[in-house]
């Protein structure tokens, strides 16, 4: 309790403030909001992977009932060709500008009609012809076009004498791992409603950060950013796919201007698969050398990922190798291969999820070859300071995660030999993996008004895509102002509020919490004056220390138990436990949901998810939920996530983000458990039936069943 | 266009009768959302592959995205908006909030409607793929495994699955006690 | 989606007339397949004739001791039917292993049999597909065919039939009953689905415009000892990779009757007659079961990327028969 007798809200499990709206169907997502005089746009996408549009014949479509028109590269307004996005210039954003196609799924036209049914029917009547050109989707780290990845996130690691340490190692693991192209698959398809008023662009858009999107839209349409107003109150998940400025809002804004009325562009599920970012495929070579006692000598992680020539992107797979374990020599390399693929974008745990699968599998392979407990191996190699930079860690409670997790999971009883546990026809195995996930804050601004009625209006440009940001920030504001949560009115999801970190990079909530706390401080100074209302605003940009003396990470240890039926290849996860060190937890109930959700995302990645492209045309074949499998209820056991006590010294309140760490780590833990069950190491995700099934001779015959 | 491509229909939705003129192409989902402004049911895929559009038609759970509005003419439809009684939440809705059975909330109306339909199916003795069907007459216990299998037609990408299952089991136990 | 007319009728004759008299008219049952394909632009009927108000919604006893499943009985109702569960357990299990609770409440007996393949190229009108547009080519044969056929395919089409329900029906020698304007007819399920040949667009032997009125399950003691096992890429709510429906009747240590059908391996439910003959008449030993599985699968021709399905089909036949054999052993001992 604080001096005013008010219980601190931070640290308490409280249900979501918008919970009632969500269970009664009254939380309104973008497609739920009616709009007078609304027209509907239906997106049309390219069916070739590379080439030129020869012709778009809209004669029939234009004659159909309700059709207002068709926008394509011949009549669409010009957009800024030099627009930039997170990673630099992004030529995928100016849509409908020319006839060149660089990936299948590229938006090439928008059919606008009075109703969605009419627009869809007319879109089907559009006759598009192409001059196809040879395309290349054949991803490999040895591709001739391979190049070093952007170093926007800093230089790759290179310490010690790698080759000498490898040569001196008692055992060297040198293996290659693969992860496929994947799709975020947020359940709400991307949708936007846009309209223009007095030269101002207004849009309701399902995105993860309206302020950032408004800046890109302003640049794209070459208008003053003050004239772009974007709102995203309730968003049906994002997982990174809605951090970028999407086709839906770009096309809706173009059409609204062209047809001079509000236009909604709702992508179909298929279009979401075809035309909104993906996690790129990766190929990763990991070399690890160790002494016979398990001490690591050398770590080399070289990861390559695919991207589009249209835009820069970074799938930062090499973070684990430089942080998790101490070794005298550590080298990381990151390469990019431009191909005729959908431009990738960050997907929950970008880099960390595929990177940790490769790296923590390789670490397990070291333990396997040395025949030692993989958990002991990990504990043995814990660094005191960052193994690459030599800087201390601001907090590092990974060992506690390992120890507490091992205790709860019953790791001590584990027989470390593979393929020795059977239950009927099933093989049973357990595995573990760790994660270090970079943490920090992005600049954000908040405004708080103390109202005459004793309440506080808190405005911050956060978005709640299901993270619980709304609930968490209310708790943070209440504590910072020393009042009960019922006196806080929080306004989020609106670009007009000002700059704010989007719900991405696991930094949305911590960044906005930081801004709220600083604003509350400023406001409290003004409150001595009894005049109301009184307002304070703070932008945290100057307050952020970009060169801290200590490295800031969150940590996890994930434990998995699987069963495998070698006769059918079916792998089922039976238990999943994650222990997390993620700073001080604002709301354990909601934080746990985030982490469990992430872990299940990792389970889905481990066992199910794979975007398959036609080997000949390069087009996506798995563009629906019947072809692209994500975990369903029946795949998911009782998943447990819990926290070790932690406090982040770099944050004024001890917070860290936790939106993505659940995803990373789980795939490796499951892959390691599958090895333990079967004795086969799966170095390619997903670990699907066809990869696991064993011919009859290999799996032992079930006992004779003579019934004579 | 000759007008046999449109129909006059009557839908009884959440105990209220609506008369509508619909394009025959209009699905029940779109009719609810666009014509009746009942936007609780969500369009996650429009192809029966996610369950976000689940509503109850004549008491049974169905996917409204593959139900033509015209084919539902005369039917009684219950949507998420019609579940709470005079603003009083059902135990299942309350359990979803308390146990955090959702994150983004987009799948939630479908999960809850599906759960209501599922519990009725279970109470009627319908088996599932994991029911040990040795004795069809015997009532099966509603285990976690049963709930998971029976709810598998409702995807949740936020993966609130474990707390959804918990909320359903808790609500079903409470409703059983309440009679 | 093309605009269409809609009619509902309570009389079979009216339904047949409506379809006969209008070009491009089709029956609508649960709609879970046809509406889906209309949205995808694969089907574009000019008229839908809703048959759910016809008097075809009952499950009745057949004079010979079998069961008659009305064409519009929902998949859920068949699966929950006490007689089905008792006398044809694999049928109930197969239906429950398919789709989702919601879809099973909508889907019907007739519609389930006539659902189209889930080949992704088939459901995308911008792809070449002989089944959708005869002569346009088969995109899958050299494309993504990880879950396509391993048996009985031709270079014209390598798709599989997606129905779970049809697999045990095939094993149980079910018969499709239909009505036309020229009178009723019957087709055994074994002849209902046509081999692929060079016309993959022609899927069934059902006459044009015919209305399925029922599926008849003949009496068969063996069906009471049956099982369905489905393997797929996730634990539920996914189409089969490979599935097996099998029934086994062991008397005095000898296999008196055995039925085996596979799903997910061919353009139609695959009756494993070779395996059946290999087992019939002798003891159900592990060795004989294994031989039976091998014999059936010997004819399999996997495509570039689906050889694992051959192993899977083989192992699954073995696993299900082994379980059934163990069951009958237990029954005898217990
Ligand atoms: C997401 C999803 C997952 C699915 N998963 C599975 C699965 O795992 N396993 C499985 O087996 N199935 C699965 N299905 C398919 C489902 O079982 C079928 O769509 C359903 O059985 C079709 O029945 P219906 O009554 O809805 O048919 P409709 O869609 O109404 O009709 C299908 C076709 O049959 C014709 N027709 C219908 N009834 C008659 C009749 N009596 N006489 C003549 N013609 C008729 C119609 O004209 C139409 O051409 C899935 C479907 C979806 C959408
Ligand atoms: S396998 Fe059959 S359905 Fe698939 S593309 Fe080839 S012809 Fe079409
Ligand atoms: S929207 Fe109906 S099932 Fe997905
Ligand atoms: S809560 Fe987001 S999809 Fe279920």
Image: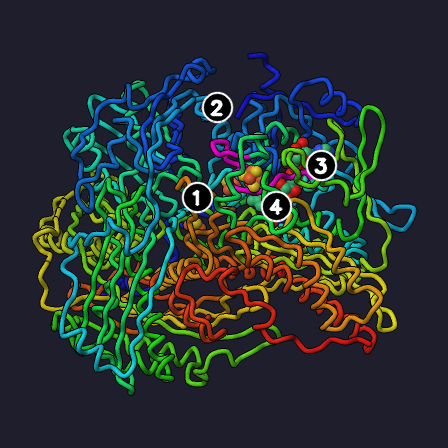
**Nearer to the camera, A324 or A508:** A324
Tell me how far mark 3 sits from mark 4, CA to CA.
14 Å
Judging from the image, mark 4 belongs to the subunit labelled: C
Q: Name the residue under label 2.
A: A121
Residue B129 drawn at (x, y percent): 65, 58
Q: Where's ligand 1: which quadrant? A: top right
Q: Answer left or right for B72 relative to A544.
A: right
**Nearer to the camera, A10 or C47:** C47
Q: Name the residue under label 3.
A: C204
**Nearer to the camera, C310 or A347:** C310
Q: Name the residue under label 4.
A: C160
Residue C186 drawn at (x, y percent): 83, 37
Q: Do labels 1 and 2 share a chain?
A: yes
Q: Are marks 4 and 1 on the same chain?
A: no
- Which picture quadrant has residue A264? top left
Q: Mark 1 points at which residue?
A: A614
Tell me how far mark 3 sits from mark 1, CA to CA.
29 Å
Tell me how far mark 2 sits from mark 3, CA to CA.
30 Å
Q: Pointer 4: residues within 10 angstroms few (<14), some, or many (20+)? A: many
Specify which label sits upstream in the sequence, 1 or 2. Answer: 2
C117 is within the stretch colored magenta: yes
Judging from the image, mark 3 belongs to the subunit labelled: C
Is residue A417 in view?
yes
- Which picture quadrant has residue A48? top left
Question: In the rendered view of the protein, which quadrant contains the C terminus of chain B?
Answer: bottom right
Residue extent of the magenta highlight: C114-129
Q: Do labels 3 and 4 share a chain?
A: yes
The residue lying at 54 percent from left, 64 percent from top is A570
Quick one: SS at disc 1? loop
Quick one: SS at disc 4? loop
């Amino acid at each position: 309790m604080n001096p005013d007798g008010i219980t601190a809200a931070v640290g308490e499990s409280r249900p979501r403030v918008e919970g009632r709206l969500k269970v009664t169907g009254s939380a309104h997502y973008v497609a739920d909001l009616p709009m007078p005089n609304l027209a509907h746009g239906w997106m049309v996408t390219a069916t070739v992977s590379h080439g030129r549009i020869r012709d778009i014949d809209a004669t029939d479509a234009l004659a159909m009932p309700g059709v207002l028109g068709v926008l394509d590269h011949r009549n669409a307004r010009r957009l800024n060709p030099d627009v930039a996005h997170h990673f630099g210039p992004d030529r995928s954003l100016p849509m409908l500008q020319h006839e060149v196609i660089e990936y299948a799924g590229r938006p090439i036209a928008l059919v606008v009609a009075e109703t969605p049914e009419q627009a869809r029917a007319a879109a089907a009547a559009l006759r598009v012809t192409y001059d196809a050109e040879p395309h290349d989707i054949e991803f490999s780290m040895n591709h001739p076009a391979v190049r070093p990845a952007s170093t926007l996130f800093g230089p790759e690691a290179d310490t010690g004498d790698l080759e000498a340490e490898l040569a001196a190692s008692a055992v060297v693991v040198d293996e290659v791992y693969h992860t496929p192209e994947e799709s975020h698959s947020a359940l709400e398809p991307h949708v936007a409603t846009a309209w223009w008023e007095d030269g101002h662009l207004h849009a309701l858009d399902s995105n993860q950060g309206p302020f950032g999107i408004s800046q890109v839209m302003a640049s794209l349409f070459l208008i003053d950013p003050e004239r772009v107003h974007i709102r995203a109150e309730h968003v049906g998940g994002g997982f990174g796919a809605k951090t970028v400025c999407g086709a839906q809002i770009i096309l809706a804004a173009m059409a609204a201007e062209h047809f001079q009325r509000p236009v909604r562009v709702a992508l179909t599920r298929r279009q979401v698969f075809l035309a909104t970012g993906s996690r790129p495929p990766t190929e990763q070579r990991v070399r690890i050398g160790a002494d016979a006692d398990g001490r690591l000598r050398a770590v080399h992680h070289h990861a390559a990922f695919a991207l589009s020539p249209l835009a820069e992107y970074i799938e930062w797979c090499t973070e684990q190798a430089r942080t998790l374990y101490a070794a005298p020599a550590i080298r990381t390399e990151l390469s990019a291969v431009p191909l005729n693929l959908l431009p990738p974008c960050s997907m929950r745990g970008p880099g960390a999820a595929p990177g940790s699968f490769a790296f923590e599998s390789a670490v397990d392979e070291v333990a396997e070859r040395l025949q030692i407990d993989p958990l002991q191996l990990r504990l043995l190699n814990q660094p005191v300071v960052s193994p690459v930079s030599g800087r201390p860690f601001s907090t590092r409670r990974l060992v506690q995660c390992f120890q507490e997790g091992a205790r709860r999971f019953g790791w001590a009883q584990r027989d470390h030999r593979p393929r020795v546990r059977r239950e009927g026809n099933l093989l049973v195995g357990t595995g573990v993996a760790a994660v270090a996930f970079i943490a920090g804050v992005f600049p954000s601004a908040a405004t708080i008004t103390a109202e005459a009625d004793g309440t506080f209006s808190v405005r911050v440009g956060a978005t709640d895509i299901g993270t619980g940001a709304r609930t968490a920030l209310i708790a943070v504001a209440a504590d910072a102002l020393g009042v009960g949560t019922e006196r806080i009115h929080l306004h989020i999801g609106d670009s007009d509020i000002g700059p704010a970190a989007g719900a991405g990079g696991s930094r949305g909530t911590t960044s906005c919490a930081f801004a709220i706390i600083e604003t509350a401080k400023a406001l409290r100074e003004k409150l001595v004056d009894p005049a109301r209302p009184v307002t304070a605003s703070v932008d945290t940009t100057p307050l952020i220390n970009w060169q801290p003396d200590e490295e800031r990470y969150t940590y996890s240890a994930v434990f998995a138990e699987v069963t495998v039926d070698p006769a059918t290849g079916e792998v089922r996860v039976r238990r999943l436990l994650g222990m997390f060190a993620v700073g001080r937890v604002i709301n354990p109930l909601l934080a746990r949901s985030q982490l469990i959700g992430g872990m299940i995302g990792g389970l889905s990645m481990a066992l199910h998810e794979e975007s398959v492209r036609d080997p000949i045309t390069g087009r996506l074949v798995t563009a629906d939920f019947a072809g692209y499998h994500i975990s369903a209820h029946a795949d998911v056991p009782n998943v447990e996530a819990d926290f070790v006590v932690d406090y982040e010294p770099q944050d004024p309140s001890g917070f860290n983000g936790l939106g993505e760490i659940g995803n990373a780590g789980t795939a490796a833990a499951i892959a390691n458990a599958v090895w333990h069950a079967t004795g086969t190491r799966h170095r390619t995700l997903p670990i699907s039936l066809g990869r696991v099934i064993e011919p009859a001779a290999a799996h032992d015959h079930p006992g004779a069943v003579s019934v004579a | 266009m000759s007008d046999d491509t449109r129909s006059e229909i009557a839908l009884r939705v959440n105990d209220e009768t609506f008369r509508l003129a619909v394009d025959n192409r209009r699905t029940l989902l779109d009719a609810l959302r666009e014509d009746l402004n009942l936007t609780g049911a969500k369009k996650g895929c429009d192809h029966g592959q996610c369950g976000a559009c689940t509503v109850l038609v004549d008491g049974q759970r169905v996917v409204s995205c593959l139900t033509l509005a015209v084919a539902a003419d005369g039917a009684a439809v219950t949507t998420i908006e019609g579940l709470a009684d005079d603003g009083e939440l059902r135990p299942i809705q309350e359990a979803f909030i308390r146990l955090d059975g959702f994150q983004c909330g987009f799948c939630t109306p479908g999960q809850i409607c599906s759960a209501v339909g599922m519990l009725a199916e279970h109470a009627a003795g319908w088996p599932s793929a994991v029911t040990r069907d040795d004795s069809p007459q015997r009532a099966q216990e509603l285990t976690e495994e049963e709930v998971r299998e029976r709810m598998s037609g409702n995807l949740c990408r936020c993966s609130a699955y474990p707390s959804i299952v918990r909320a359903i089991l808790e609500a079903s136990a409470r409703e059983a006690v309440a009679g | 989606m093309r605009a269409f007319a809609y009619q509902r009728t309570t009389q079979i004759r009216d339904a047949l007339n409506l379809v006969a008299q209008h070009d491009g008219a089709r029956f609508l049952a649960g709609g879970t397949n046809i509406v889906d394909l209309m949205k995808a632009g694969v089907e574009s009927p000019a008229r839908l004739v809703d048959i759910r108000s016809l008097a075809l919604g009952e499950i009745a006893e057949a004079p010979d001791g079998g069961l008659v499943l009305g064409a519009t009985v929902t998949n859920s109702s068949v699966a929950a039917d006490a007689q089905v569960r008792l006398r044809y357990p694999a049928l109930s299990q197969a239906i429950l292993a398919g789709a989702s609770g919601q879809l099973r409440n909508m889907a019907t007996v007739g519609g389930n049999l006539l659902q189209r393949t889930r080949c992704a190229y088939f459901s995308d009108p911008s792809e070449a597909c002989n089944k959708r547009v005869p002569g346009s080519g088969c995109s899958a044969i050299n494309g993504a065919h990880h879950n396509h056929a391993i048996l009985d395919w031709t270079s014209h089409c390598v798709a599989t039939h997606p129905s779970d329900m049809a697999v045990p029906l095939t094993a149980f020698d079910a018969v499709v009953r239909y009505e036309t304007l020229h009178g009723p007819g019957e087709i055994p399920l074994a002849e209902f689905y046509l081999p692929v040949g060079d016309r993959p667009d022609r899927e069934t032997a059902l006459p044009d415009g015919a209305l399925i009125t029922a599926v008849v399950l003949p009496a068969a003691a063996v069906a009471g000892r049956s099982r369905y096992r489905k393997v797929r890429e996730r634990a539920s709510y996914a189409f089969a990779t490979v599935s097996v429906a099998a029934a086994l009747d062991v008397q005095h240590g000898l296999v008196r009757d055995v039925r085996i059908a596979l799903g997910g391996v061919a353009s139609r439910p695959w009756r494993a007659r070779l395996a059946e003959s290999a087992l019939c008449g002798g003891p159900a030993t592990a060795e004989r079961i294994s031989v039976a599985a091998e014999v059936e699968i010997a004819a399999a021709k996997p495509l570039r990327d689906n050889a694992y399905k051959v192993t899977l089909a083989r192992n699954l036949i073995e696993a299900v028969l082994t379980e059934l054999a163990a069951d009958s052993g237990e029954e005898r001992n217990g």
